[in-house]
Image (cartoon, rainbow, N blue to C red):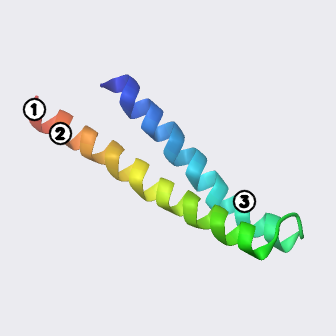
Amino acid sequence: MKLVSRILLGTALLSLFFCLAAPFLYFWKQMSESGYKSLFLAASFGWFVFSALRLSIRKNKSTSQ
């Protein structure tokens, strides 16, 4: 279960990185507006999903002990 939690943490942090990088890439003209919106939407969705899953695993682990 610890491995799954670490994988979810890694994917959540990667999603957060893309959430933070997307505006910079758009303002530096490295991507189009539609690309920015798509990347930001996917990264935001990933951040919330992976973070929530990781927290639920940690909560279930602490209540089962």
Q: Left or right of 39: which side holds 53? A: left
Q: Residues within 10 Å of mark 2 (few under 14, many from 20)?
A: few
- Which residue is under mark 1? 64
Q: Amino acid at mark 2?
A: Asn
Q: Amino acid at mark 1?
A: Ser
For residue 36, what is the image quadrant? bottom right
Nearest to N terminus: mark 2 or mark 3 = 3
Q: Amino acid at mark 3?
A: Ala
Q: Residue at x 57, y 66 (%)?
A: 41
**Given contact means CB atoms under 8 Å apart, are the residues at marks 2 and 3 in contact?**
no
Q: Residue at x 40, y 53 (%)?
A: 49
Q: Position of residue 58 (x, y in %)?
A: 26, 39
- Which residue is under mark 3? 21
The quadrant of the image that shows the N terminus is: top left
The quadrant of the image that shows the C terminus is: top left
Q: Left or right of 54: which side holds 16? A: right
Q: Position of residue 22 (x, y in %)?
A: 72, 63
Which residue of the protein is positioned furthest toward the right in this rendering?
A: 29
Q: CA distance from mark 2 to mark 3?
A: 32 Å
Which residue of the protein is positioned furthest toward the left in this rendering?
A: 64
Dot 1 lies on which element? helix
Dot 2 lies on which element? helix
- Which residue is under mark 2? 60
Nearest to N terminus: mark 1 or mark 3 = 3
